[in-house]
Image (tube, rainbow, N blue to C red):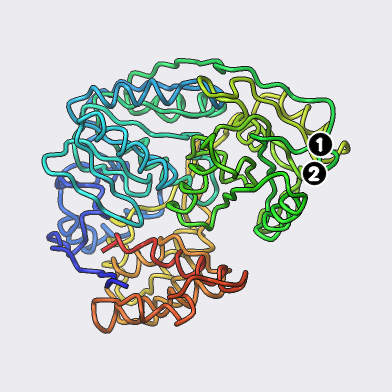
Amino acid sequence: MALLLLRNRKASALGIPRILRDNVEPFSLNSEKIIGAFASVDVIIRSYCSGSGMKKFDFTDLTRPHTWYPLARKKVRKVILHVGPTNSGKTHQALSRLESSSSGIYCGPLRLLAWEVAKRLNKANVSCDLITGQEREEVDGAKHRAVTVEMADVVSDYDCAVIDEIQMLGCKTRGFSFTRALLGICANELHLCGDPAAVPLIQQILQVTGDDVKVQSYERLSPLVPLNVPLGSFSNIQTGDCIVTFSRHEIYRLKKAIESRGKHLCSIVYGSLPPETRTRQATRFNDASSEFDVLVASDAIGMGLNLNISRIIFSTMKKFDGVELRDLTVPEVKQIAGRAGRYGSKFPVGEVTCLDSEDLPLLHKSLLEPSPMLESAGLFPNFDLIYMYSRLHPDSSLYGILEHFLENAKLSENYFFANCEEVLKVATVIDQLPLRLHEKYLFCISPVDMNDDISSQGLTQFATNYSKKGIVQLREIFTPGTLQVPKTQAALRELESIHKVGLFDFLF
């Protein structure tokens, strides 16, 4: 297996990789404690380290995050919200505009979505780079790029930008990345695609930016019919069905139960499968000539895959969210159910039901209710703030700095401080290694589940090896078993966990 290289790219004047720099221009602080105008970080530090200056400035005042992005504030952006249900064509309209633009960027929540957009644009002879947590594919002369939202470029000027699934700015863990993209992307046109529940909050947030905001609503292109009869038995499974459950164990159990009847073969899709594997499984399911005519999936089907599903079947209406077993929320039900039926496919009319009759009332109720309006967006201090604070407190660990922000951050009513429990867990490990601050920060925001023992151990080994050599070989974190095709569920689970560790090789 090839080397996985983590290289220190040429640093800026601060020794900070470009990915972390939200300000490319010099900037300064005014009396309102605004970050992002016109003086360098070092000038700020020299000014505020002397006399009473340091006492005047509060790095934990995060009440004006729009000022962190001076490039975006230099222009009046034309912001178009494309809102509507799944299969309404809202994203298609935004992508059509991106395709016709002179330069542009697409930001999505999944690598799979970025990959699909890059493929679409390149096929249309619009050169497009692909930049995600797993790969960087650059096309000569490209003025367009498709990225995962954490990689949103806020230091370049674009003609057009698209942020997909914008309602995720309300996500406790990833919402701050969507907020950063919303406030920071510098583009003549900014197209936001998602749920109508995000509209009032976005309008409020953008009141202070001076942007021109318009809302374009869409209706579903094909009907979605909630059934009054449950599936009841796996003997009633039909071609084109997708049965949804919320644990890896249940996915394989249901697959076995359906296939044991000898009528159908099942493709499977769930979150910890690598994107390429998910795509292959989806392609096999969509192929009318394939024997794999049924799909067993998690809520990972809610976005990122084009699927020819005739009927969605909820095996349960409850989900363990890492804290408790709870009922599915209205947005979750709608997102999943909406995958049934696809305009222009062989299943233009979608149906949705449950495995058991006792779950039908919640399904029907959720489909009729409007999604609750988002009340606030995620926020997290950018690296410039953390770097400046560290210069004033050189003995502070990254954990200590993050904890200080968490305990003392001041926010406006439109924002909440992102859940940084995972970040703090990583920081406790990374602080013990001889790494520079920006390297520690990057490891801390890497998408690794610290509750997964294999992933957390892999991250620790990965970071340790990098701190010693500046380069990491995959063989150093893979066990002999994970270099082979897995033959057991345990081996497959280990390979999936180790795969997650490779998701942040772009960071350096």
Name the quadrant of the N terminus.
bottom left
* Amino acid tagged 2: Phe
Camera-side residue of 266 and 152? 266
Picture quadrant where residue 127 is located:
top left
Q: Position of residue 190 (x, y in %)?
A: 32, 27
Q: Is the residue marked by circle 1 packed among few (<14), some (14-19), or many (20+) residues within 10 Å?
A: many
Q: Tell whether label 1 touches label 2 (CB within 8 Å).
A: yes
**Residue 282 has which mark?**
none
Q: Position of residue 445 (x, y in %)?
A: 41, 60
Q: Which residue is mark 2?
A: 234
Above or below, comparing residue 425 to residue 461 in the picture: above
Picture quadrant where residue 483 is located:
bottom left
Picture quadrant where residue 118 is located:
top left
Name the quadrant of the C terminus.
bottom left
Q: Which residue is mark 1?
A: 231
Q: Position of residue 346 (x, y in %)?
A: 56, 24
Q: Is residue 77 left or right of residue 285?
A: left
Q: Is residue 259 left or right of residue 503?
A: right
> Which residue does the image show at 40% across and 62% down from the upper left?
446
> Which residue does the image show at 60% across and 34% down from the upper left?
335
> Which residue does the image show at 51% across and 16% down from the upper left?
218
Camera-side residue of 437 and 487? 487
SS category of the residue bearing label 2: helix
Question: Disc count in the image?
Answer: 2
Q: Residue furthest right?
A: 358
Disc 2 to disc 1, C-alpha distance: 7 Å
Front position among marks 2 and 1: 2
SS category of the residue bearing label 1: loop
* Amino acid tagged 1: Leu
Q: Position of residue 431 (x, y in %)?
A: 39, 77
